[in-house]
Amino acid sequence: MSVVIWVHDECLNPEARVFREYPGAPAVFVWDDGAIENEQWTLKRIGFVYECLLELPVSILRGDVAEQFAGFAAGCGASRIVTSGFVNPRLARVAAALDGLEVLEEPPLVDLPADIDLRRFSRYWAKAEPLLFGRKA
Amino acid sequence: MSGAFKSDEMRRAFDNRGDLVAYLRAQFPAAAARGGGFSAFRGGRRAALARLSGCDPGAYAASRNSLNGSVTRLSPYLRHGVIGLREVVDSLQKRHGGLVRARKLVQELAWRDYWRRVWARIGDGIWEDRETYKTGFHASHYTGELPRDVESSATGLACMDAFARELKETGYLHNHARMWLAAYLVHWRRVRWQAGARWFLSHLADGDAASNNLSWQWVASSFSSKPYFFNRENLETYTQGAYCRACPRRGWCEFEGTYPDLRRKLFPLLEPGA
């Protein structure tokens, strides 16, 4: 079953799990023209991201992300899609349009329960600090 | 790179950085027109690892609040997942035989983790006030427009004009400069934090709504128990006087005064009997 990797702007790491677990799989990054306008990106960030992409084994496209990705995946004959974890709701909306997407999360800074109290940093830190300073690398 | 769909692929081969800049200017003319130059940071994993190897957590703890302090400048790489928070902490631990010297740096990295966890929970709500302002003012007392003189570095305040210029030209600002500029906009100019956050996100190479918006809310007091503000003495100390010395407003700027004085001026409705 062939796999295609969707690379997005929250994980531009050539050593990310998606690349380690699927070496040689076709991968694509799509510049989201709508987001660049909505979020008013400048060339400073575009240039930074582009230089990151040049160290990744990806094809670089632009336009509507889900549409471009679908075309790329169809061209590869892919039946499965993998990507790295993300938080941005903009990426979540793209992900919702991709059938059969598998998300490979990178290791978190610290393992905490999903329902941890986040009302203030101090509450988070009370739980995170002992775990961070009590573990071995 | 691979696959059959090749019709609209963007270029991957460039003779040098200038060649890449020219290509991107042509490809993204609207973004180029929004101002500034190219990123002050070189993108990529190799550059991220080089920065990581240069991190000095002891010096960071001692000097991070100064504009010439030993900060990591890893934020654009962390924001774009070129390098992970866990990886940075593990690297510090291995290199220094533990995290004793890195306590402050690890805590600052944890702030980034915390903001992202909040974002994951609230999604698009990241653009809404988390809580009411603790300034005595209602959100409707703040304007939603970024003042033109601030955006164009024409306030006459040497510090704020320099920070705005640096933001636009380089895509980076030291964290303390971000806090001063944010406090100036929200508390002195009475601008809604969202307007400032949008402006920062547009220019920052490390901008993400998690760290950016929630830090703005922390300054504004809509995600903290009190507003963050500063006085000239504080700014002068941590900038080694670099801006105050040459400032045309030296001696009579709006940041002059003690903290109690400034609190009375900025937040008069919090005064007893107000």
Image (cartoon, coloured by chain):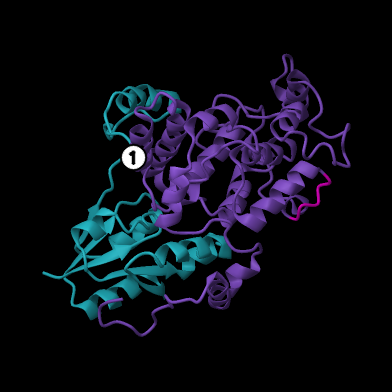
Chain colours: A cyan, B purple
Q: Is residue B217 left or right of residue B261?
A: left
| Chief SS of the magenta region | loop
Q: Position of residue B122 (x, y in %)?
A: 40, 42
Residue at x 45% of width, y 34% of height: B111
Q: Quadrant of residue B31?
A: bottom right
Residue at x 48% of width, y 39% of height: B55
The answer to whether residue A22 shows anywhere in this view is yes
Q: Eyeballing the image, is B174 above or below B274?
A: below
Q: Quadrant of residue A20?
A: bottom left
Q: Eyeballing the image, is A28 above or below B97?
A: below
Q: Eyeballing the image, is A118 above or below B72?
A: above
Q: Position of residue B237 (x, y in %)?
A: 72, 29
For the residue pair B250 and B213, the one nearer the viewer reads as B250
Task: Give the amino acid type for the residue marked by disc 1 in the picture.
Answer: Arg
For the residue pair B120 and B28, the one nearer the viewer reads as B28
Q: Which residues are magenta?
A: B152-156
Residue at x 40% of width, y 38% of height: B113
- Of all chains, the one bearing label 1 is B
Label 1: how many Cα within 10 Å (few below 14, some 14–19, many 20+): many
Q: Secondary structure at mark 1?
A: helix
Q: Eyeballing the image, is B195 above or below A34?
A: above
Residue located farthest toward the bottom when viewing the structure as drawn: B7
For the residue pair B41 and B216, the one nearer the viewer reads as B41
Residue at x 71% of width, y 35% of height: B239
Read off the residue under disc 1.
B86
Q: Is residue B76 left or right of residue A111?
A: right
Q: Position of residue B51 (x, y in %)?
A: 47, 47
Is B154 within the magenta? yes
Is A6 within the magenta? no
Q: Position of residue A80 (x, y in %)?
A: 18, 66
For the residue pair B210 and B98, the one nearer the viewer reads as B98
Q: Quadrant of the C terminus of chain B?
A: top right
